[in-house]
Image (tube, rainbow, N blue to C red):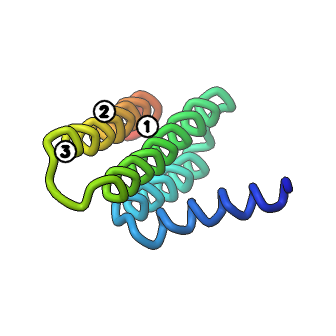
Amino acid sequence: MMLAKLRAALAGISYCLRTQVNMAIHLAAMLAVLVAGYYFRLQTWEWVALTITITLVLAAEALNTAVEVTVNLYTGKYHPLARIAKDVAAGAVLITALGAVAVAYFIFGPRLGF
């Protein structure tokens, strides 16, 4: 039972990686941040902040994908409420991504002379 749930979760992550360009962009940004963090020898609290931030962005992107797929399943034609649901989910991703940029600025900015 637990293994089946883990497989289902991994299948969902795999689906996001295979079908969502933005997920690949977020993962590339995550890799760059991790490399920069290692290079600058971040303190533990900075790693915690980055870990939480990265997790929120990736989770928001996954939830956005789930909303889009669910809306598409429900209706194959244009509906203004379907558009709103998709736009709000995309907006949530944008909010977390902007928050991630702010966290990166506060952590890496002083090290880069900003």
Instruction: Give residue 114's mark.
Output: 2
Q: Position of residue 106 (x, y in %)?
A: 41, 28
Q: Amino acid at mark 3?
A: Arg
- Quadrant containing the C terminus is top left
- Quadrant containing the N terminus is bottom right
Mark 1 closeness class: few <14, some 14–19, many ≥20 residues within 10 Å: some
Compare marks 2 and 3 and give the one earlier in the sequence.
3
Compare marks 3 and 1 and give the one earlier in the sequence.
3
Q: Amino acid at mark 2?
A: Phe
Q: Amino acid at mark 1?
A: Phe
Q: Residue furthest bottom?
A: 18
37 relative to 103, above or below? below
Out of 78 and 24, give the one closest to the viewer. Answer: 78
Q: Alpha-carbon distance for marks 3 and 1?
A: 37 Å
17 relative to 75, above or below? below
At 30% from the left and 39% from the top, the residue drawn is 94
Out of 99 and 66, give the one closest to the viewer. Answer: 66
At 39% from the left and 35% from the top, the residue drawn is 96
Secondary element at tag 3: helix
Do the numbered discs 2 and 1 sit on residues whose CB atoms are within 8 Å?
yes
